[in-house]
Image: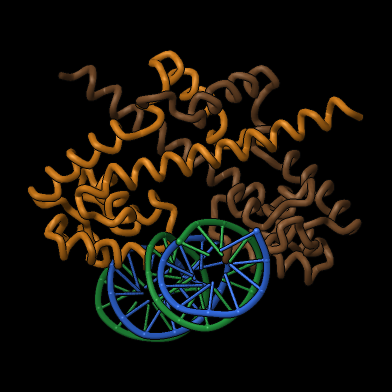
Chain colours: A orange, B brown, C green, D blue
Amino acid sequence: MKPPEDRVARSHRLALEMVRVAERAKADFAAAVEPFGLPVPLARALLLLETPTPMHLLAEQLACDRSWVTGLADGLEERGLVKRAPGADRRVKLLELTPAGESLRSEVARAAGEGSVVMRRLSDDERSTLDRLLARLVEEPASGD
Amino acid sequence: MKPPEDRVARSHRLALEMVRVAERAKADFAAAVEPFGLPVPLARALLLLETPTPMHLLAEQLACDRSWVTGLADGLEERGLVKRAPGADRRVKLLELTPAGESLRSEVARAAGEGSVVMRRLSDDERSTLDRLLARLVEEPASGD
DNA sequence: TATTGTTATACTCTATAACTATA
DNA sequence: TATAGTTATAGAGTATAACAATA
């Protein structure tokens, strides 16, 4: 009865550490983005807008509600970074980066990558290993997981 | 100028995946804890109280403000899971598990471990590898990081 | 003066529900 | 009838500021 308990306890400890690292990653992101004067949720959205994107699809990518995206779009539009463009289906609005949005997006992407713990603390090999493990952890459950 | 950009972009992607996995881990924790009828923040605190702990130290372990700990202590006390005991320094209060708190704590710890993605998706070897990588990512920066 | 716990209040990120205009 | 975006409101999880007791 001891060995199974040990695996369980260790798994819990690792889960906690994953959360700690993620918090670190978020803090790094916030720090990397701060010089641009862009609130974090807006920066997250900006990075996803490499290509014109229907608002409901952005909601899906951010794993949030459509109503939250309305506010994000407002914020980005106020700053002149995106514009709402009509979609083929007239219910749909596309969020499309302005030239200012494009250039800010690439600056923010670079800063976010360079500022990340993953960049600063791991070697290329370690990044490959981590990549593989994370893929296991986020992959869709096969039938009956 | 291309290779460095690739490493940067990849690091950012990995950081995003860490966050996704952590969110998964949190959702797993919430699901594991839900049957106990204990709000998540209270469950997190409970798990840290293996031994009687000054409130300001719990705040440190949870990486939150002291004022938040007051509410957590209230919640745990209302449920009969901890009691506030006087410390040596009379400003300090120790949070100490009651017998009910002890037994619930070990049940919750088991459920949280068993419910975690890390437990369900990874082999023992993979857990060891992950452990090593996470340690690199959370370790204190050596002088001049 | 500095620190512990407390209280009241405010803030950030996000969800829910109800609305409108299309489909 | 169902879906896209909007609006107003509400909630969870936290921080901040000011305070009393103690060091």
Quarter of the view holding residue C14: bottom left
**Which quadrant holds the C terminus of chain B?**
top left
Image height check: is B19 above or below A63?
above
Relative image position of residue B70 (x, y in whole percent)? 64, 67
| Residue farthest to the top, as pictured | A125
Quarter of the view holding residue A38: bottom left
Quarter of the view holding residue B122: top right
Q: How many marks?
A: 0
Image height check: is D2 above or below A29?
below
Q: Is residue A84 left or right of residue B29?
A: left
Image height check: is A119 above or below C22?
above
Q: Residue at x 71, y 57 (%)?
A: B89
Q: Is residue B27 left or right of residue A105?
A: right
Q: Residue at x 30, y 66 (%)?
A: A70
Q: Residue at x 83, y 48 (%)?
A: B107
Image height check: is A109 above or below A95?
above
- The answer to which of B5 and A139 lies nearer the viewer is B5
Q: Residue at x 18, y 39 (%)?
A: A106
Relative image position of residue B130 (x, y in whole percent)? 58, 24
